[in-house]
Amino acid sequence: MRQPMVAGNWKMNGSSSSVKELIAGIKDGMASVTKAEVVVCPPAVYIPRVSGAVEDTAIKVGSQNVCDQDKGAFTGEISGEMLKDVGCEYAIVGHSERRSLYGESDELVAKRFAAARRNGIKPIFCIGETLQEREQGITNDVCSRQIDAVIALEGVEALADGVIAYEPVWAIGTGKTASPEQAQEVHAFIRGKIAALNADVAEGLRILYGGSMNPANAAELISQADIDGGLIGGASLKAEDFLAICSAAE
Ligand code: 13P
């Protein structure tokens, strides 16, 4: 049985006071979350504050990216060791906003994945197709190519050290969710592809769905056979909504 996981990607939102309020709200509701693994990924500057606040809880902390290098002249980047030092257990890598707005290639994402691993951080490895790619019928090819970059660098067994988040780009922040059937189809493809290389890794690997997941659609999405939880953007900024999705995952 794979443990369900719900991760909140706060993106570039919040302030000292709103972060304090949000994490307090999530902590307050955690008593009713017994099965799902809960992760929050604040903007980097707020990670130490959030790590401190969740110390005595089951809530885990992740970053929104991690540098592919470990130390030195890489202005603006944050190393895996630093993230570990301030309490991160997870790091998102390859988010579509990083790929499309900041030009991160499959190869760079794979290197960031590797950097997380070698620093003892579990990658939340994001993949997914654009609307144009879906309309061209190449959704599986795109996801495959993105996964292959990590496999080429780290081997298929490396996937067992993290989770995959399938986030169709057209569903992110648009209010347009993939239907449970559409999402399940891609999740099954991803698991099948990995199973062809290593059945144990595929069986144990958690594959999250992301893209306009909310309290109203979470249960149906997460009840699909190959959907093991969610990576939540907008709805993770309200404690009540985020907790409702955590409950749905149970
Ligand atoms: P939304 O839930 O706002 O669509 O964002 C999803 C996402 O990008 C999570 O990483």
Image: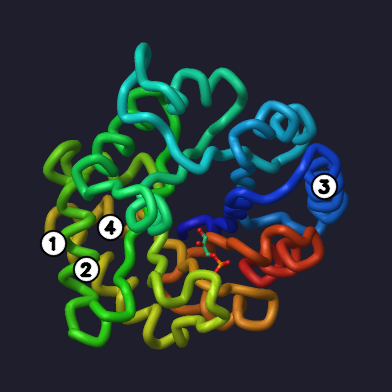
Assess whether mark 2 and mark 1 are in contact (beta carbons under 8 angstroms).
Answer: yes
Q: Amino acid at mark 3?
A: Ser
Q: Amino acid at mark 4?
A: Ala
Assess whether mark 4 and mark 1 are in contact (beta carbons under 8 angstroms).
Answer: no
Closest to the camera, between mark 3 and mark 2, is 3
Task: Give the image quadrant in which the ligand numbered 1 is located.
Answer: bottom right
User: Distance between the Cα atoms at labels 3 and 1?
Assistant: 45 Å
Q: Position of residue 9 (x, y in %)?
A: 58, 53
Closest to the camera, between mark 3 and mark 1, is 3
Closest to the camera, between mark 3 and mark 4, is 3
User: Is disc 3 placed on a helix, strand or loop?
Assistant: helix
Q: Which residue is mark 2?
A: 192
User: Distance between the Cα atoms at labels 3 and 4?
Assistant: 38 Å
Residue at the image point whose x is 17% and y is 46% from the top: 151
User: Is disc 4 placed on a helix, strand or loop?
Assistant: helix
Q: Answer left or right for 141 relative to 34.
A: left
User: Distance between the Cα atoms at labels 3 and 2?
Assistant: 41 Å
Q: Amino acid at mark 2?
A: Gly
User: Distance between the Cα atoms at labels 1 and 4?
Assistant: 9 Å
Assess whether mark 2 and mark 3 are in contact (beta carbons under 8 angstroms).
Answer: no
For marks 3 and 4 on the same chain, the one whose residue lies earlier in the sequence = 3
**For residue 32, above or below residue 216:** above
Q: Amino acid at mark 1?
A: Ala
Assess whether mark 2 and mark 4 are in contact (beta carbons under 8 angstroms).
Answer: yes
- Please identify the quarter of the rendering in which residue 162 is found: top left
On residue 18, which mark appears? 3
